[in-house]
Amino acid sequence: MQQTLLQFPEIKLNRRDGHKLRGYFANTFGADSDLFHNHDQEGRNIFRYPKIQYKIVEGVPMMLGIGEGGKLIVDRFLAIREINIDGEAIELRQKNMKSEDFEVRMDGELYGYRFVNPWLPLNQKNHSEYVELDAKAQKEKLQGILINNMISFFKAVDFQAEERIKVHLDLEEPRVAKFKNQPMLIFSGGFVSNVYLPDYIGLGKSVARGYGTILHKT
């Protein structure tokens, strides 16, 4: 399968502006395809792994398209001339786009990843369950959630795991942040897995806004 990464390197934004980046492109191209925003015609969420994701990594805004999502980005490349953040139109004088094939695989090797944007594994329900657990059980719960996050991605790219998925988390102490006006635990750090995953995909909640973005450890 192919993925396309479109970066705007001349612009610097805060990571928390990821939802504004998403909002702009959803409003601009959302009528063309619901992949730009993942909502149906009544405005309800479409529950699927997002094939277009909006990220701000180390200050650089970018869009990631997977499969048909990547094709949509390529098709609209010339039409993307500016972005509008908080009512300010920012001209795009430089756009870097790269499309490449990737293969998810399990080949007996172990691969290390780091979260370049915080990982959001918990919702309101499992957050209350998580805080009642001891440290060992908390880690086991988070590892199970991460595996489920990976399986969600697998479904989007038609990958079937033929052996047990293994993960080992190495996380920093979580921080509390406001998310949609609710306090949530966010995690930084990384993990090791027996699955080879492509760079820049997101895992966990709100990957369309850039949370849970991973890169291979170097």
Image (cartoon, helix red, strand yellow):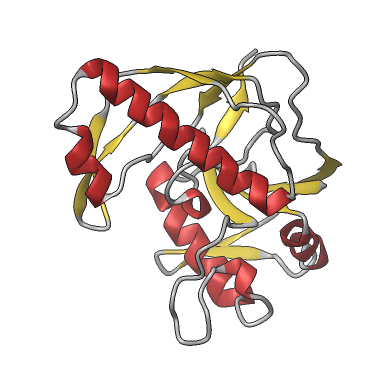
Q: Residue furthest left?
A: 132
Q: Residue furthest bottom?
A: 42
Q: Residue 131, percent across and down? A: 17, 32
Which of 83/19 is in front?
Answer: 19
Q: Residue 58, percent across and down? A: 51, 33
Asked which quadrant contains residue 92, the reply is: bottom right
Q: Residue 33, percent across and down? A: 67, 76
Q: Is residue 4 above or below residue 131?
A: below
Q: Is residue 83 above or below residue 134?
A: below
Taking the spot 61% from the left edge, 41% from the top edge, the residue there is 201
Asked which quadrant contains residue 107, the reply is: top right
Which of 48/208 is in front?
Answer: 48
Taking the spot 82% from the left edge, 47% from the top edge, the residue there is 1
Q: Is residue 67 above or below residue 164?
A: below
Q: Residue 157, percent across and down? A: 72, 49
Would you say residue 111 is visible in this rendering? Answer: yes
Taking the spot 28% from the left edge, 25% from the top edge, the residue there is 138
Which of 132/205 is in front?
Answer: 132
Taking the spot 44% from the left edge, 81% from the top edge, the residue there is 43
